[in-house]
Amino acid sequence: MPISLDEVRHVARLARLDLDEAEMLALQGELNALIGHFTDIQNVNVTGVEPTSHAVNMNNVWAEDEADDPFARDSALRNAPMSRAGLFVVPTIIED
């Protein structure tokens, strides 16, 4: 079922697109080509194909939750733009 030029005009108006006649015709051709691709996909024989939620098998990879030695304070603050009394200083984002 091809898209008519009136339908293209209607959709362009709804989307507030200011298209001239040549752009309307080009858009009509592109939309009809897209619908043709959907028709091709609908005609694919998928009998016997199991439905999947992903194109590839997905497996969760869980890392062990193990405590590790923390950074030394001097090492953590070394690249901070500003620090004071061993703490990070960040800009104030809440105004009074």
Image (tube, rainbow, N blue to C red):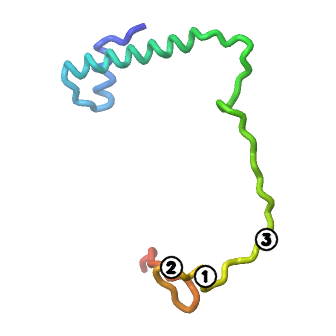
Secondary structure found at label 1: helix
Measure how far apart labels 1 and 2 are at the Cα level. Answer: 10 Å
Q: Give the residue at mark 2.
A: 80
Question: Where in the figure is residue 82, as x and y percent of width and height?
Answer: 47, 83
Identify residue type, mark 3: Ala
In the image, 75 versus 18, the foreground residue is: 75
Q: Of label 3 and label 1, which has the lower sequence position?
A: 3
User: Which image quadrant: the N terminus?
Assistant: top left
Question: What residue do we see at 38% from left, 14% from top?
Answer: 32
Could you tell whether 18 is left or right of 11 in the image?
left
Q: Mark 1 points at which residue?
A: 75
Determine whether label 1 and label 2 are within 8 Å by CB. no
Residue that protrudes farthest toward the bottom in the picture = 85
Residue 56 falls in image quadrant: top right
Pointer 3 with pointer 2, Cβ within 8 A: no
**Secondary structure of residue under mark 2:** loop
**Mark nearer the viewer, 3 or 1:** 1
On the image, the x and y values in percent for residue 68 come to: 76, 72
Residue 57: which disc?
none
**Along the line of sight, which residue is nearer the eye, 32 or 5?**
32
Disc 3 is placed on an element classified as: loop
Give the vertical position of 65 relative to 38 (above or below).
below
Alpha carbons under labels 3 and 2: distance apart: 24 Å
Residue type indicated by callout 2: Ala
